[in-house]
Amino acid sequence: MADEYSVVVQDLVKLFGDFAAVDSVSFQARTGEIFGFLGPNGAGKSTTIRMLCGLLHPTSGTASVVGIDVAKQPERVRQNIGYMSQKFSLYNDLTVEENIRFFGGMYQVSDSQIAERLRWAVRMAGLEGREHALTATLAVGWKQRLALGCAVLHKPKVLFLDEPTSGVDPISRRQFWELIHEMAATGVTVFVTTHYMDEAEYCNRLVLIYHGKIVASGSPTELKRTAMKGELLLIECAPLGPALEALEKSKVATDVAVFGNALHVVVPNAVEAVPLLRSELEQNAISVTRMEQIPASLEDVFVSLTAHEPAPAVPR
Amino acid sequence: MAESAAIVVRDLSRSFPGVKAVDGLSFDVKYGEIFGLVGPDGAGKTTTMRILAGILVPNSGTAEVAGFDVVHNPERVKQQISYMSQRFGLYEDLTVDENIRFYAEVFDVKRTVYKQRSEQLLQAADMQPFRQRLAGKLSGGMKQKLGLICALIHTPRVLLLDEPTNGVDPVSRRDFWKILYSLLGEGVAILSSTAYLDEAERCHRVALVHEGRLLFCDQPDRLKSKLQNRVIAVSTSDPRGARAAIAGTGGVRSVVLVGDGMHLLVDDAARLMPSLSGRMDAAHIPYSSVEAVTASLDDVFVNAVESDEEVAHG
């Protein structure tokens, strides 16, 4: 079916000189899906998004957004997408209504439609009665919902969100994602990029890009269950400093991170590692009060897949 | 005399026209501890940091840093601390090494000490290959790490970090935290703010703040255990259908849809799980698991703010 996928990327490549920022990437985002695109700084995320928004021409490969080729018809692509970033594009010295009208003009919403879209956006953002308030006076959560309203005034079929709830309190964040889930249910495809794994949890499906290549994909639960390189142990022990040193030298542990008063240790096999690590720690006069396998978090998966190769030495 | 706390904050308040940024805040930070000041934008984190750094005067209340009162002795306070604000000044047209040397000179660090410390910090930050790169050409995560190295090139007794990992990817964030933990052996006290509750889990203790006020102050594990048997995670490919199926079940406080499931805050998880499964079975909703899970700090925060508002408005 033609409409099953809203974003289709096939063997996409972008070279800057000799440097492959995006190195033959392929993926598809289903229509009405909340699709998360993750990767460390410099992995090729922004370059991919710029190509999908028709702002950057691919070196080779193809990408289409709602069936429109991004290289051949970038203008038409831009008419069909919405974009919202953590750094709100709102004008603080305009009122709520002025901002909406401004973005309506920019997205070429017709005069006959703008009144209806204005009412819709105000209602969606929960700003009824505050149409004439200066945007600068709104709390962060309201601003975020107003920015979302402005980004979708022209009813785009694909919505790009860049760390949309950065810095927002957890209650506003939940309200924001509730709106996103509702939008997705009406068939809008939502394309999310973020560094924050708690935002990634709200996505139906995730793709992780690293050094320009896709290194994992799946639902958040699938990634946590299957994509982790190794298994994760929680170790509570004292003193913590020497324990950290001992584990960093240990051949059994592939990664160690401190979490408050405990350590998270990655090992190839938990059952085999527990007695080995216990005796290594005890040999170093470290008393272990707890050592058990725990489920990996998305952050653990992300780090295990991206931490152990050196970053490319080529300047960007 | 037993060593006193590194930071002592008592009933601290500060208003700006139209807003109470900090409203009666009290907490202590010990030496050798990483303490998280955790809350959304606008919670008063930056204002608190600026007061503690001796660059902003409170309207009322007191704050002591390394034994000095921030209002009466701001200059002495500044000698004891390192403060990394959100716009820490790196020189973009200087290299990594040159930036570090610049700050070593500003802080009057001896050359031999500076050499050794800079090696250690660069290694911990995994930044040795980039010593000759211009700061302006570093990625966001590396700039933050370089800022931290510069702030730590002298040995402060108290380190104040204002949202140090904003916009930094998880891998750089781990390096960043590794450096922080390595300082604890030196007895440094670290106060770090963040808007991200998952990051707060790395602190020994956290203060959750909202609209300038303290909601809770405790170890992350103890905060989470307040909601034991209160959170259920359902894993399903049809979160919306699942939510509709369980609508109206008594004892469910809130439902949050996530990418492949839903999280519920409930009165009694163990008692409620069978009836939730039953309702989903009856509605033919496919699900792979229904389980009681450890609450996140997010859950703790939402629960606290909602009960707070019930008290305030109820």
Image: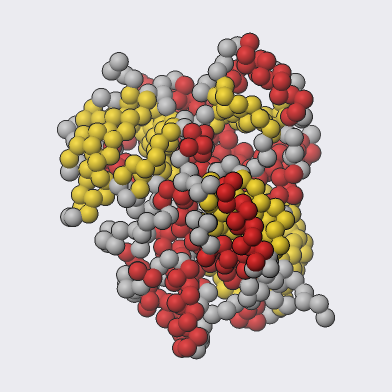
Percent coordinates x, y for residue B228 in the rendering: 75, 39
Q: Quick one: quadrant of the N terminus of chain B?
A: bottom right
Percent coordinates x, y for residue B220 in the rendering: 69, 51
Percent coordinates x, y for residue B234 in the rendering: 61, 27
Please give left or right for residue B24 compared with residue A52 in the image. Answer: right
Front in this rendered view, residue B16 or A296: A296
Percent coordinates x, y for residue A295 in the rendering: 58, 41
> What residue appears at the point 32 percent right and 26 percent down from the top-left corner?
A6
Front in this rendered view, residue A162 or A136: A162
Q: Quick one: quadrant of the C terminus of chain B?
A: top right
Dividing the picture into quadrants, the one containing residue B161 is bottom right
> What residue appears at the point 22 percent right and 46 percent down from the top-left corner?
A14
> What residue appears at the point 57 percent right and 33 percent down from the top-left corner?
A175
Dividing the picture into quadrants, the one containing residue A157 is top left
Q: How many marks?
A: 0
Q: Is residue A73 visible?
A: yes
